[in-house]
């Protein structure tokens, strides 16, 4: 088997098409690699070499694609820093980025000029900001990290806390790429990959850039900004390029389906595999997507619900190719208490879970408490080597039994089912309550902006005081009626009482770039009075 570096440097049959703001520009993979080798020479002149960690803010630009390989060929370790999260102030982002740069000891902060300009001048000076556009070219260099060296540090956007850096070796990355090839049953000679996912996220970097590059497949790489400006671009690109493989999140699929509104794509889809992950996959989202795109030939068996995380490089389990996802109806209250109780599919109170398939080849998924909804433990040849600069957190998560994922779920008939994050569960009146179940129920309300709700406990360690923060699709909606409906949903789904509903401006509920609500930041902003509020409904008196 070729090494990771051999795979990337030997790709020469196919082309990458990058969106540059107005159109796609393209180059063969070997042309990208040749330019990266010359960029590596330019980076060597700036002190980048073996053992050096280099901080980067990775967008989906052609120069960023070349830049990742350039740092590696110079011998450096790429530290991928978060892009600005939704609702994050300039000051907050600056503090986050400068703090990570200090911890990594990076002599440079590389990124697109337009992104680096987002930082104040003093921060740019302190971090040694250098735009990809300003990296000179020198004599080609090719001295990448060894198989067991740290090649990539994936910093999360912090959906549940401060960013943590997962350290990945070339061996782990190569093992993950082989897993994706196996789990998708992909034929490199026939596949065409289409993506808009951010390269700052593990699914975008390894699932949608490194995977087609290593196996010499064509890639059409759009941008998150273009997708957010027009949700039709994702499936429009799939139709235009004849894309057979893609990946995205549950939230993004919902956005794309709603944007389509039954309009034709212009040509039928050639899509074979759409990997959906990064957050819990919802049955209603998959079914709505099939309805929205059925005129273009999309069917349920094209969707591949999957489970993964940055600590495993990416994928852990996935639905079999061309198999319809498995849906399981369970009692939501029992689920919150850690019990798996199947219920009738026509039960209106049922909670539907979507199976994420069997573990990938060589991967083991265990329940910390077998037979219950409990934290999942993972063993995998693509596991990270730990968290950069954080031995205490590494020791607590990377254990002898396996990686403690922080995800709650169970294995049923060999298939992984996710129930939520451990951070989503709170104790109310002596009962465990999964707040994500309530948020998903609220999302189903027509006036509410889907994927933009957070139930927050602001009780401060005393008795729980639950506040729903949510965005509206229409500013003039009847907030009193919506708050009442949300309270009813919370009572029916989880047996809890909402104390207050806070309706905020669109775009203000903080999220990671991959679309996950940052509950801890939402709570902090709410308590500080920094969420732009449209209306507040006190449910204790209304």
Image (tube, rainbow, N blue to C red):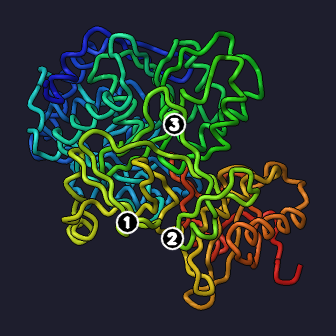
- Report crowding for label 3: few under 14, some 14 to 19, many 20 or more residues within 10 A (C-alpha): many
The residue that mark 1 highlights is: 370
Relative placement, left or right, of 515 versus 203 is right
Chain-order first, disc 2 or disc 3: 3
Residue 338: numbered disc: 2
Q: Secondary structure at mark 3?
A: strand
Callout in the foreground (1, 2): 1
State the CA–CA distance, disc 2 to disc 3. 29 Å
In the rendered image, the vertical position of residue 269 relative to residue 3, given as above or below? above
The N terminus: image quadrant: top left
Chain-order first, disc 3 or disc 1: 3
Rendering coords of residue 397 (x, y %): 28, 65
State the residue lying farthest toward the bottom.
462
The residue that mark 3 highlights is: 248
Residue in the image at 48% along x and 69% along y = 423
- Report crowding for label 2: few under 14, some 14 to 19, many 20 or more residues within 10 A (C-alpha): many
The C terminus: image quadrant: bottom right
Q: Secondary structure at mark 1?
A: loop
In the rendered image, the vertical position of residue 30 relative to residue 401, given as above or below? above
Q: Is residue 133 visible?
A: no
In the rendered image, the vertical position of residue 85 relative to residue 286, given as above or below? below
Residue in the image at 71% along x and 18% along y = 295
Quadrant for residue 206, please give it: top left
Residue 163: numbered disc: none
Rendering coords of residue 105 (x, y %): 20, 56
Please name whichever residue, 222 or 386, is drawn nearer the observer in this view of the structure.
386
């Amino acid at each position: 088997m070729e090494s990771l570096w051999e795979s990337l440097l030997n790709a020469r049959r196919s082309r990458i098409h990058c969106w540059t703001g107005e159109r796609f520009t393209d180059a063969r993979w070997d042309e990208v690699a040749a330019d990266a080798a010359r960029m590596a020479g330019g980076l060597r002149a700036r002190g980048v070499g073996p053992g050096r960690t280099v901080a980067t803010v990775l967008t989906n630009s052609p120069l960023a694609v070349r830049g990742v390989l350039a740092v590696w060929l110079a011998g450096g370790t790429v530290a991928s820093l978060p892009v600005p999260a939704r609702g994050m102030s300039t000051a907050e982002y600056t503090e986050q980025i400068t703090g990570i740069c200090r911890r990594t000891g990076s002599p440079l902060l590389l990124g697109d000029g337009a992104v680096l300009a987002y930082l104040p001048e003093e921060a740019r000076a302190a971090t040694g900001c250098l735009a990809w556009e300003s990296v000179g070219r020198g004599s080609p260099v090719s001295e990448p990290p060894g198989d067991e060296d740290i090649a990539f540090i994936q910093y999360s956007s912090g959906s549940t806390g401060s960013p943590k850096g997962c350290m990945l070796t070339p061996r782990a990355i190569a093992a993950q790429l082989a897993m994706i090839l196996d789990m998708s049953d992909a034929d490199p000679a026939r596949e065409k990959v289409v993506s808009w996912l951010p390269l700052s996220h593990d699914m975008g970097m390894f699932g949608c850039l490194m995977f087609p590059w290593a196996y010499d497949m064509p890639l059409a790489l759009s941008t998150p900004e273009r997708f957010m400006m027009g949700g039709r671009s994702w499936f429009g690109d799939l139709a235009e390029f004849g894309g057979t493989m893609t990946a995205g999140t549950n939230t993004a699929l919902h956005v794309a389906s709603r944007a389509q509104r039954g309009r034709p794509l212009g040509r039928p889809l050639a899509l074979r595999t759409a990997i959906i992950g990064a957050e819990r996959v919802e049955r209603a989202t998959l079914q709505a997507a099939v309805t929205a795109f059925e005129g273009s030939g999309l069917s349920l068996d094209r969707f591949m619900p999957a489970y993964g995380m940055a600590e495993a490089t990416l994928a852990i389990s996935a639905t079999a190719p061309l198999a319809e996802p498995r849906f399981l109806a369970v009692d939501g209250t029992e689920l919150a208490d850690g019990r798996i109780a199947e219920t009738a599919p026509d039960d209106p109170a049922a909670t539907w879970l979507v199976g994420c398939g069997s573990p990938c080849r060589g991967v083991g998924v265990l329940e910390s408490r077998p037979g219950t909804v409990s934290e999942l433990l993972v063993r995998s040849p693509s596991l990270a080597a730990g968290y950069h600069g954080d031995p205490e957190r590494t020791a607590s998560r990377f254990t002898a039994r396996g990686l403690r994922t922080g995800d709650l779920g169970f294995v049923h008939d060999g298939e992984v089912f996710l129930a939520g994050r451990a951070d989503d569960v709170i104790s109310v009146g002596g009962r465990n309550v999964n707040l994500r179940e309530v948020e998903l129920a609220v999302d189903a309300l027509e006036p509410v902006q889907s994927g933009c709700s957070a139930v927050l406990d602001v009780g401060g360690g005393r008795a729980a005081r639950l506040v729903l923060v949510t965005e509206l699709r229409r500013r003039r909606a009847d907030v009193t009626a919506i708050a009442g409906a949300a309270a009813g949903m919370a009572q029916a789904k989880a047996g809890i009482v909402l104390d207050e509903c806070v309706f905020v401006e669109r775009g203000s509920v903080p999220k990671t770039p991959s679309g996950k609500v940052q509950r801890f930041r939402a709570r902090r902003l709410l308590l500080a009075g920094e969420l732009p509020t449209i209306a507040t409904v006190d449910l204790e008196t209304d």
